[in-house]
Amino acid sequence: MPALEASIPSRETEPLTRLPFQPISKSHILHCSYDYWHPKYRSSALKSRIIPLSPAFLSYLREDGIVLPSETAVASANYNNNTTSDGWDESPDPDPSLQFPEIHQQIKDTIAELGGLVAPKLNWSSPKDATWISMTKNSMECATPNDIYLLFKSSDFITHDLEHAFDSCAPDDTLRQEEIKYVLVLRKWFKVNPSCEFRCFVKRKRLIAICQRDLNHFDFLFPMKEHIRDTIEEYFNKTLKGTFPDDSFTFDAYLPDPYDKVRLMDINPWAPRTDPLLFSWLELLNLSPPMPLLGISESDLSPAIPLSSSDEDTQDEDIEELQWKPEIRLVRKDDLEAYGFVSPQYSAHKLPKDVVDASIGGESAMREFADNWKKMLDGGMEMQGTSDEDDHDDDSTVIES
């Protein structure tokens, strides 16, 4: 009886402590900047204008506090009506646009050129997390330069572009954060249909996955699922596949009714900072489409499979390769997202209603709010919402976008 082979103890797989991304290059981040890719794909992108930004304008965006140019009627009224005897408003801040008059005027002219309404963004991000501060519209619709300044100075996304664009990138001394050429992008405003937006994932120059951007259920999309996938895949193969410099990236596509044409909304890095939405980054990183059965492989690491691997005559045999399709995910009716069981979008960037109301009331209201808050912290004033009767108080809500 042969001896039993000694069993080799199996190693337990160590849990992942970080996503297995390849090192992210700074050049990849720059390739996803709007001013880099828009000139290449202008014909399929949204109508927009790009304004280079000066150091003075960038300094204004980075400054603490929100001071708007004097053309804002609301700001002027606050200065006149909220003057107090203790010197809060005795020295109003100077008009910040005097530091960048050319850019300020160029923004005015561009808004007029694009029909009077625009949607703004910086190189990579738009201030979607700050729409709560636009109390009358609660959107990114901007009609004046001050609308843009207010959104930008209130947005964490814009701050990330300005201060953390190269975070988590591989070291590269040839590219530094302070050398980034920042631009203001103004897109012609139109009412976006959220059901028509899709995020697309490209890995090693193959479109591997597509999903909705809006996390709501749209029943009418399901019968068109194959058509939507084919339309996006055709656009990618004809427009992006051979022209974008990086092998892996994501892009946002907009398919307006009748869903037969793609508008390129954005190109995003293949990096953890990009939201995978209905996928997870772990499954996207592990997802690999099959290699072609015939011809030259896309990877130089694997040689092409020969047409015949035996001495038998196979000339009369038809070898048909099954076409691989990227996965497309839509929000199903029974998904938690469709019922709003998740946190509201950008809720981490919003403020309590008390704070918003105080900011609208001017500096005297903000001072009163701060005094009351200090008294509550010191125990001299009862905290609101501590009893059962206050559980449904409207003042405990947050402003949602």
Image (cartoon, rainbow, N blue to C red):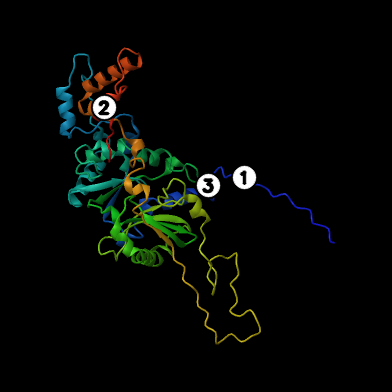
Q: Is residue 326 above or below residue 370?
A: below
Residue 19 circle label: 3
The residue depicted at 22 percent of the width and 52 percent of the height is 191
Q: Secondary structure at mark 1?
A: loop
Q: Nearer the viewer, residue 194 or 63?
A: 194
Q: Nearer the viewer, residue 279 or 334?
A: 334
* Mark 1 or 3, closer to the camera: 1
**Mark 1 or mark 3, which has the lower sequence index?**
1
- Contact between labelled residues 1 and 2, with CB atoms less than 8 Å apart: no
Question: Dot 2 surroundings within 10 Å: few (below 14), some, or many (20 or more)?
Answer: some
- Residue 369 quadrant: top left
The residue depicted at 47 percent of the width and 56 percent of the height is 248
Tell me the CA gap for discs 1 and 3: 13 Å
Q: Nearer the viewer, residue 325 or 86?
A: 325
- The quarter of the image holding the C terminus is top left
Q: Nearer the viewer, residue 40 or 196?
A: 196
- The quarter of the image holding the N terminus is bottom right
Residue type highlighted by circle 3: Leu
Residue type highlighted by circle 1: Glu
Residue 14 circle label: 1
In this rendering, the count of numbered labels is 3
Residue type highlighted by circle 2: Asp
Residue 91 visible = no
Residue, disc 2: 354
